[in-house]
């Protein structure tokens, strides 16, 4: 590990956002704006059954009565929800039965993103679901997974093919009325991944979804649902990029995880949505609700995230520790540069007995950015002997950025233990000079120091992702020194 | 190799070096001694390029180039090494990783490919042995939780890894017990050859029993006031600095 991590440091990518290109493919869109007809349009496009349409329509009604939240420590102009296109998809030339049927333009897009759609070569045995705008393009390695009884497919397909599972779990962890963006997502969600791991199965490979926004003026509203049945295990990776555009694009996803008795879900994200340019023009608004339910006893849900992109990030991957002895973990690196704003953190809700949670958050602010950690640790009256450890560190690069920490504690049972540690540090001149004196340039020095600072989080990412994350960090902090 | 002429340096409006002169040739070891506050460490920092020092006059030529025109990292890649008096800690970055980055930064500068992992590890083990550091030290975060002596040995280890042309040791001996002192000196002696040079800044003659200098200079009031061979160090050990101060005063 040590060695590979180091190799990455040598391979610095010295470029701006390199995923900013657009794919020129024939697309079909929903008319701009949002009303009941659009919800019906999306549902019809996906050949959804009646129950799904009704579910969406109810969510839409709920959303209409809700107001966009204002409490976050981020600032942006009002979003006109009627100026957004809620459905965009690459026009299918024919039905995709195999990899050969994929539009060459789309293949090329994923090649450029460094994730070729080819089963033989794909990320050393990682099954990938490729989602472009509102539609899943293809999911690889399906046969191999099917042998083990693992279901890994697009959400659209799951609604058609695995209705019983979807009906049973969709909206149980993040209810449609949970918050403004969750309600919006429930009404118009496009595609995303669905995973079911049967009892006693250890998923034989890492599952991954790659989200790509391509179309202009389009929002991305994916929905992911992962169910790990008793004693099963799955590691899931999520990556995202978007083209460079002057206008802001909205991304409002919902992710729901359910872990049954003794099941474990590891969910890793490397979020690299377009962050806007150096003057803060453009960029993705990333308003995401991610929540895991440790339903069963001794279950475990672990979130690991590296957030480098988006103009605004507003996201709190959370764990509801319902089962006795269940464990929740949150490991996060959030980087902001230029005019980026991030308000991110987690919620650990202890309900079951002997539940444990661990939060390690590393915020890095550079340029004129603002980076906030917001975390809630809630211990219910029922949660005997709960234990939480939180560590929130902030690193400042330069003197025009800001770091903020908002920890919330709600403790209703005093048999437990809650520990909180927080630090704020700067990359001092002495440290820089020391690195310079060994021959490292300013950028190499910052990269090295920052990667060291994030090590505790990176070690919880799967290898492939750790590599990606370190490269991204370098790109994100480009121009933050000197 | 290094030629310093009439160097004037200020820190926050205060003159530290005044008309400083020094000539160092390849293969030489120069020791700089002197009482506290005479500008010894300032000299080391200026040579390495620390930016809070303002050079108000004079010039420094290093291997035919204007050293003052070069950034600190350029100087390092060109073979200037400073063993710090107070080495910093870098959490989460192992000494191994740090050295790999440094070695390869230098190689890149020289137009070479990065060193392959196997060769690098061989080099690491070989150099580690010189300063008697265990394997565990190089895999720990750089200097984090190291004792004073370990930090200084780590500096010499890094010097061995980077094989500088001009190595500046800034009071590397301060705070070292006799064993660590021997290890540090031994490191320097193993590295010295006809092509490189050392500038050893020290308070005490003790280190010079182990690292035998070709020249000993006494600094006082921001410049060198007396130079001699290794016997000058012994003289200073015996008589202290007062007679030098008196000499300077009588000349003024």
Image: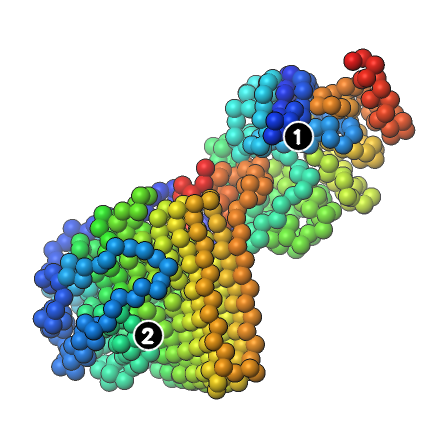
Based on the displayed image, in which of its 4 quarters is residue A91 positioned?
A: bottom left
| Label 1 sits on residue | B42
Q: Residue at x 55, y 24 (%)?
A: B68
Viewport quadrant of the C terminus of chain A: top left
Front-lying residue, A185 or B176: A185
Across and down, in percent, residue A446 comes to: 49, 45
Q: Residue at x 66, y 38 (%)?
A: B84
Tally of numbered tags: 2
Q: Chain of mark 1?
A: B
Q: For the residue labelled by badge 2, is the local secondary structure a helix, a strand or a loop?
A: strand
Alpha-carbon span between mark 2 and mark 1: 60 Å
Name the one closer to the observer, B59 or A404. Answer: A404
What residue would you read off at disc 2? A256
**Image position, residue B213 (x, y; %):** 78, 27
Q: Nearer the viewer, residue A59 or A303?
A: A59
- Pair 2/1: label in front: 1
């Amino acid at each position: 590990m040590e060695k590979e991590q180091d190799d990455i440091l040598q391979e610095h990518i010295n470029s701006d956002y390199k995923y900013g290109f657009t794919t020129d493919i024939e697309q079909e869109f929903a008319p701009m704006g949002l009303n009941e007809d659009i919800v019906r349009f999306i549902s019809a496009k996906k050949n959804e059954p009646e129950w799904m349409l009704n579910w969406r329509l109810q969510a839409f009604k709920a959303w209409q009565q809700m107001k966009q939240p204002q409490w976050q420590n981020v600032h942006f102009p009002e979003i006109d929800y009627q100026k957004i296109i809620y459905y965009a998809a690459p026009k299918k030339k024919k039905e995709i039965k195999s990899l050969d049927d994929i539009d060459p333009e789309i293949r090329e897009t994923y090649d450029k993103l460094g994730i070729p759609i080819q089963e033989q070569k794909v990320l050393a045995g990682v099954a990938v679901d490729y989602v472009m705008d509102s539609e899943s393009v293809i999911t690889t390695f399906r046969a191999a997974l099917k042998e083990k009884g693992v279901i890994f497919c697009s959400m659209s397909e799951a609604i058609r093919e695995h209705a019983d599972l979807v009906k049973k779990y969709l909206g149980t962890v993040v209810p449609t009325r949970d918050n403004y963006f969750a309600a919006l997502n429930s009404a118009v969600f496009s595609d995303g991944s669905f995973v079911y791991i049967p009892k006693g199965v250890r998923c034989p490979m890492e599952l991954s979804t790659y989200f790509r926004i391509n179309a202009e003026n389009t929002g991305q509203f994916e929905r992911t649902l992962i169910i790990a049945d008793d004693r099963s295990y799955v590691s899931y990776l999520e990556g995202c990029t978007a083209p460079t555009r002057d206008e802001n694009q909205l991304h409002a996803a919902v992710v729901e995880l359910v872990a049954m008795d003794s099941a474990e879900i590891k969910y890793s994200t490397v979020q690299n949505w377009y962050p806007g340019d150096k003057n803060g023009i453009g960029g993705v608004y990333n308003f995401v609700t991610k929540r895991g339910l440790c339903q069963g006893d001794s279950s475990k849900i672990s979130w690991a995230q590296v957030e480098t992109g988006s103009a605004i990030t507003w996201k709190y991957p959370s764990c509801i520790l319902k089962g006795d002895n269940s464990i929740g973990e949150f490991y996060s690196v959030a980087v902001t540069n230029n005019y980026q704003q991030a308000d991110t953190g987690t919620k650990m809700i202890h309900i079951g007995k002997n539940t444990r949670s661990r939060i390690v958050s590393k915020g890095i602010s550079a340029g004129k950015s603002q980076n906030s950690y917001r975390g809630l640790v809630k211990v219910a009256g029922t949660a005997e002997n709960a234990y939480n450890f939180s560590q929130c560190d902030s690193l400042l690069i330069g003197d025009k950025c800001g770091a903020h920490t908002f920890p919330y504690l709600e403790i209703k049972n005093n048999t437990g233990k809650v520990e909180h540690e927080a630090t704020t540090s700067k990359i001092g001149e002495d440290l820089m000079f020391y690195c310079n004196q060994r021959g490292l340039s300013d950028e190499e020095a910052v990269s090295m120091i920052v990667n060291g600072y994030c090590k505790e989080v990176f070690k919880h990412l799967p290898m492939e992702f750790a590599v990606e994350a370190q490269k991204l960090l370098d790109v994100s902090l480009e121009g933050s020194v000197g | 190799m290094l030629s310093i002429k009439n160097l004037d340096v200020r820190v926050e409006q205060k003159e530290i070096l005044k008309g400083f002169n020094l000539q160092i040739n390849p293969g030489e070891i120069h020791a700089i001694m002197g009482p506290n506050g005479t500008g010894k460490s300032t000299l080391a920092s200026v040579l390495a390029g620390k930016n809070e020092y303002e050079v108000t006059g004079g010039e420094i030529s290093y291997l035919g180039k204007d050293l003052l025109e070069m950034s600190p990292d350029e100087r390092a890649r060109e073979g200037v090494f400073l063993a710090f008096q107070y080495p910093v800690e870098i959490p989460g970055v192992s000494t191994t990783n740090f050295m790999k980055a440094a070695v390869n930064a230098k190689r890149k500068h020289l137009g070479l490919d990065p060193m392959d992992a196997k060769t690098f590890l061989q080099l690491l083990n070989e150099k580690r042995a010189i300063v008697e550091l265990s394997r565990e030290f190089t895999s720990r975060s750089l200097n984090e939780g190291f004792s004073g002596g370990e930090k200084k040995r780590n500096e010499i280890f890094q010097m061995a890894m980077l094989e500088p042309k001009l190595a500046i040791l800034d009071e590397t001996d301060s705070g070292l017990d006799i064993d660590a002192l021997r290890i540090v000196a031994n490191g320097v002696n193993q590295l010295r050859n006809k092509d490189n040079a050392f500038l050893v800044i020290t308070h005490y003659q003790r280190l010079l029993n182990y690292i035998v200098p070709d020249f000993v200079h006494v600094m006082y009031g921001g410049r060198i006031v007396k130079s001699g061979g290794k016997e000058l160090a012994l003289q200073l050990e015996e008589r202290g600095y007062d007679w030098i101060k008196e000499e300077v005063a009588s000349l003024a």
